[in-house]
């Protein structure tokens, strides 16, 4: 699940929790919304955690000026 999917789950869960006044037999819509928001937040945290580990920037090697002009030195 990427960033878009996680944010989508959070948004739909928030809509179900706070903006919908439906009453379905056997389904607690507020609880479903809370679960969707929790899954979205966990997915977003996992994605950010994995993305940070993958994005390690290594410094560029420093080249000696003599080696640049005289490669056999």
Image (cartoon, helix red, strand yellow):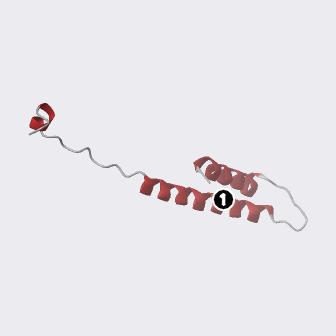
Q: Residue furthest top?
A: 69
Q: Residue at x 64, y 63 (%)?
A: 38
Q: Give the number of callouts.
A: 1
Helix, strand or loop at disc 1? helix
Q: Residue at x 18, y 43 (%)?
A: 62
Horizontally, residue 5 falls left or right of residue 68, namely right
Neighbour class for label 1 at 10 Å: few (<14), some, many (≥20)?
many
Q: In which quadrant of the rendered image does the N terminus lie?
A: bottom right
Q: Residue at x 80, y 61 (%)?
A: 29
Q: Nearer the viewer, residue 48 or 23?
A: 48
Q: Quadrant of residue 67?
A: top left
Horizontally, residue 71 falls left or right of residue 46, namely left
Q: Provide the residue designation for mark 1.
A: 37
Q: Nearer the viewer, residue 53 or 10?
A: 53
Horizontally, residue 57 falls left or right of residue 44, namely left
Q: Residue furthest right?
A: 25
- What is the x, y in percent for residue 47? 54, 56
- What is the x, y in percent for residue 61? 22, 45
Q: Is residue 50 above or below residue 58?
A: below
Q: Nearer the viewer, residue 51 or 44?
A: 51
- What is the x, y in percent for residue 73? 8, 40
Horizontally, residue 10 falls left or right of residue 61, namely right
Q: Residue furthest bottom?
A: 26
- What is the x, y in percent for residue 56? 37, 52
Q: Residue at x 26, y 44 (%)?
A: 60
């Amino acid at each position: 699940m990427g960033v878009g999917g996680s944010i989508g789950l959070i948004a739909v869960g928030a809509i179900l929790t706070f903006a919908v006044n439906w009453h379905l037999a056997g389904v607690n819509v507020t609880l479903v919304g809370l679960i969707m928001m929790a899954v979205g937040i966990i997915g977003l945290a996992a994605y950010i955690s994995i993305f940070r580990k993958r994005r390690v920037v290594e410094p560029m090697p420093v080249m000696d000026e003599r080696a640049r002009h005289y490669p056999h030195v």
